[in-house]
Amino acid sequence: MAEETLLTVEDLSIAFSQGGRETLAVDRISFDIKKRETVALVGESGSGKSTTALSVMKLLPYPSASHPSGKILFKGKELLGMSENEIRHVRGNDITIIFQEPMTSLNPLHTIERQIAEILDLHQGITGTAAQARILDLLSQVGIPDPAGRLKSYPHQLSGGQRQRVMIAMALANEPDLLIADEPTTALDVTVQAQILRLLKEIQTRHGMAMLYITHDLGIVRKIADRVCVMSKGKIVEQGPVEQIYTAPAHPYTRALLAAEPKGIAPPLNDAAPVVIKTDNLKVWFPVRRGLMRKVVGHIKAVDGVSVEVREGETLGVVGESGSGKTTLGLAIMRLIASDGPIVFMGKTVQGLQFKEMRPFRRNMQMVFQDPYGSLSPRMSVADIISEGLGVHHPKMTAAERDRRVLVALNDVGLDPATRFRYPHEFSGGQRQRIAIARAVVLEPDFVVLDEPTSALDMLIQAQIVDLLRDIQKRRKLTYLFISHDLKVVSALASRLVVMRNGKVVETGPAAEVFKNPQSEYTRALFAAAFSLEAVPGAVVAQ
C-alpha cells in the first residue's frame, strides 16, 4: 500500500509567533492520503484544520509561522523544505485548493474567463483560442449553465453556488492529483450544497483525484469521505474509516460532535394567543433601470405577496434557498426596507410610519443578524454595545440601572459579566453571536427576527445557540421569526413553517406537519437535500 500513498503528514506541529510569544496551533499530528481517496479533517473552529491544509501548500504567513516538528511528503518529496520557486510548481499543478468563501477568493475586477485563463497561462502556457476552449470545457464540467455566456461575467454577477463552481473549475484547470476543499459548502443552501458535493464526487471519480476535505459538519463527512480525522485543540484525537467513526466513536470529543445536532421540541401552537405580527400580501419589488434616462424596465420581485401571522410565544421558521426572499421579508417586517402591504404589530399598523413614528415600536421589535462580527462595532466594548439601545429608548435610565440590565442580559445568554469591558474581536464566533442576542433581549422586546444566526457556527456552538434561544424564549415569552436555510436548526425551534421560493410562499403550516408530510415538490426536494444521507452517489455511507 506504501506506493499508493500520495500525501503523508508526519508528526507535524505548527506554531505562530507574535510579540515575542509563541502559540502552538497544531500539535504533532500524523495522517496520510492515498490516491483517489477522500480524507476529511473535522473539528470546531480553531482546532487547526485549515492551518494544517494551508501548511500542505506552504501558504501560512511565514516567518511568523513555523514548524517545530514534523514533515509533509507529497509523492515522496518533502514540501516544507522546498524553496518558494519549487513549491510554486507544486501549487496549482499537483495540489490545488478551494476556499470557503468564493466571493473573497475571486478577483472582483476580473472576468471569470480572465481568472481561469491566468492559471492556464501561468502553469501550462496555454493562451488564446486554446485557452478559451479549455475554459469552456472546465465550466461545462462543473455544471455552469451557458458557459459561453458566462465568460465575460464578473463574480458579483453569479450566485453563490455558481461562484463555488467557478472556484472548482479553477482548481481543476491543471488536473491536480490532490484537491484540498476548505469548508467549500458552509455558506451554501442545502440544495446547492448537495449539488456541490455531488459535483466534487463525480469530478474526483472522473479525474482520479485524491481529496482532503475540511469541515465542521459531520453530516457532510458522512456523504463524501472515505476516512475521517477528528481534530480538537490542535491534535488529532481520533481517525479511522467513516463507518467506524460513526458507529463506534472512541473519543469523547467525537461522540460530542456526533451528538451536537440541534435537538429539542418547538414551542406548542396556541391559536388562542394574541397575534404579535401579521402581514397581508406584502411586496418588496426592486426596480430594474436601464438606458441613459434610467427608465424602469422591470422589477425584481424579492417578496411577492407574502402573508404571515405569528402569535405570542411561537417561532415562525422561514426557509428557502438564497434569493428566495427570506431575509428581505424579515427586513420588510422590521421596517428596515420599503415595502407595500399592511404590516400589523401588536394590533397597530406600522406600515407607512415615518422614522420618528417608528421609534416607539423599535424597543419591542429587535433583530439578530447572520454575521455578528459585521453587526457589532469593533470600536465599542461589549457593555457599550449592549447598553446602546437602552440609552436610545430609556434616556432617563441611570448608568447604574443600565449596567444592571447589561449584567442580566449577559447572564441570560451565558456570558461572564466580567467580560463586558472587552471588545468583539476578543471573542469567538459563538460568543459574538451571544453578544448580538444580548443586545436584542436587553430591551425586553416582544418580537425578535433571527436572520441565519447559526449558519456560520460550528455544530457544537449551533446546538448551544439553539438551546439558548429556546431557553430565553420560554423565560421571556418571546416571539421569533427565525430565518434559515439549515432545516435541522429550524426543525428544533419552529412552531410553524413558511417555505419560500422566488419571493413567494410555496408551502406553510404547523412545522411538525410540514416536516412529516410536505405537499409541494420544492419542499420535498429541499428536505431531501437536507436530511438524505444518499444525496451524494458513490460516497461511503455508514448505516
Image: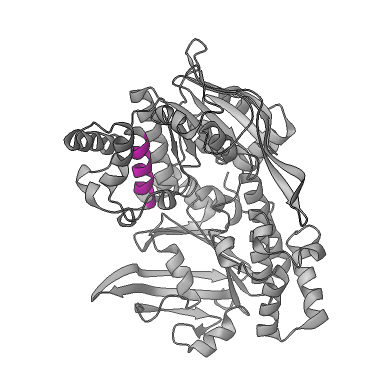
Relative vertical location of residue 53 with respect to residue 467 in this rendering, above or below: below
Q: Is residue 461 left or right of residue 291?
A: left
Residue 160 x, y percent position in the rendering: 63, 54
Front-most of residues 282 and 540: 282
Relative vertical location of residue 258 with respect to residue 206 in this rendering, above or below: above
Give me the residue at 29% from left, 34% from top.
412
* Range of magenta residues: 429-440
Q: Is 528 contained in the magenta span? A: no
Q: Is residue 167 left or right of residue 5?
A: right
> Is most of the magenta stretch helix, strand or loop?
helix
Front-most of residues 73 and 498: 498
Residue 53 x, y percent position in the rendering: 48, 69
Question: How many numbered dots are placed on residues in this image?
Answer: 0
Do we see residue 537 in this rendering?
A: yes
Q: Is 433 contained in the magenta span? A: yes
Relative vertical location of residue 486 with respect to residue 40 in this rendering, above or below: above
Q: Is residue 202 left or right of residue 102?
A: right
Residue 322 x, y percent position in the rendering: 63, 45
| Outermost residue to the top | 272
| Outermost residue to the left | 400
Give me the residue at 43% from left, 68% from top.
51
Front-most of residues 377 and 45: 377
Residue 325 x, y percent position in the rendering: 63, 39
Quarter residue 486 falls in: top right
Quarter the C terminus occupies: top right
Quarter residue 498 falls in: top right
Do we see residue 250 in this rendering?
A: no
Front-most of residues 510 and 398: 398
Relative vertical location of residue 103 with respect to residue 510 in this rendering, above or below: below
Quarter the N terminus occupies: bottom right
Give me the residue at 42% from left, 70% from top.
30
